[in-house]
Image (cartoon, rainbow, N blue to C red):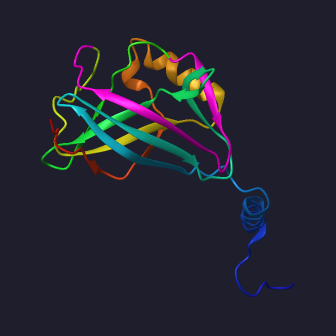
Amino acid sequence: MRKAIGPSYGFWGSLLLVAFLGTCLYPSNSPAEVTVSVSGLTRISPKQTNFEVSITNSGETPIFLAGINYESGPSPELVFIEHERERGEWITSNCMDTEPPDTIRLNPGQTLSKIYWWELSPSVCKNPITSFEGRFRIQVRYFQSDAEVRAYLKKLFSNHWKEARAAAAFSEPFEVPPYQH
């Protein structure tokens, strides 16, 4: 009778080897890499500012955004401004009152830029921003497929809106300049 020298790997060792080779040959879908940048910030009035937001898909797979496909170009709608509070927590001002009708596909390496006009408007906003003072950042919610966009919006515009989840990318924090007459 032969006695094995060293540990016997048998079934579990084979399973581990197959799992390892599978991840090498067929890499899993890693999270998309999305870059958000802000430029051209201008203070229009004490209650209004505008700036350009650029969303870049720096990953290797397409991403999808909820928005509106106008003749002049796509307009992403799940783009939110966040205000940093004193303790360093970020408050998202969600000012959507209607569901965006379209899906925007952003291919790897593609950038989408849009100028946003932000006005202090507490009427339809959850967590409204009451003044443009302090540090802000932009949050963009994105998805891996058109179906994910639709499922998210269905939940967001229902009684279960607090359960809606999406991947999010953030710009670097920025300051809004004081309004000059």
Q: Is residue 108 magenta?
A: yes
Up-down: is 67 above or below 31?
above
The mark total stands at 0
Q: What residue sits 67% from the left and 42% below the top?
A: 62
Is 59 or 39 nearer to us in this picture?
Answer: 39
User: Is 162 positioned to the left or the right of 15 in the image?
Assistant: left
Q: Residue furthest left?
A: 86
| Percent of width and height locating residue 46 | 17, 31
- Above or below for 41 versus 96: below
Which residue sits furthest bottom? 5
Q: Residue at 36% x, 23% y: name it.
A: 162
Taking the magenta stretch, the answer to whether it contains residue 178 is no
In the rendering, at what x and y percent does residue 179 appear? 17, 38
Residue 12 place in picture, x, y as percent: 72, 64
> In the figure, residue 9 lies in which quadrant?
bottom right
User: Quarter of the image containing the C terminus?
Assistant: top left
* Depth order, front residue of 87/68: 68
Which segment did they paint magenta? 100-123
Question: How far from the left and from the top, in percent, is residue 159?
Answer: 39, 11
- In which image quadrant can residue 18 be found? bottom right
Q: Which residue is painted at 17% across and 45% down in the image?
A: 134
Query: In front here: 104 or 18?
Result: 104
Residue found at x 47% / y 26%: 77
Most distant residue in the front direction: 181
- Residue 142 horizontal side relative to residue 2, left or right: left
Q: Quadrant of residue 97?
A: top left
Pick the quarter of the image with the N terminus: bottom right
Q: From what the image shows, is residue 58 above or below residue 79? A: below
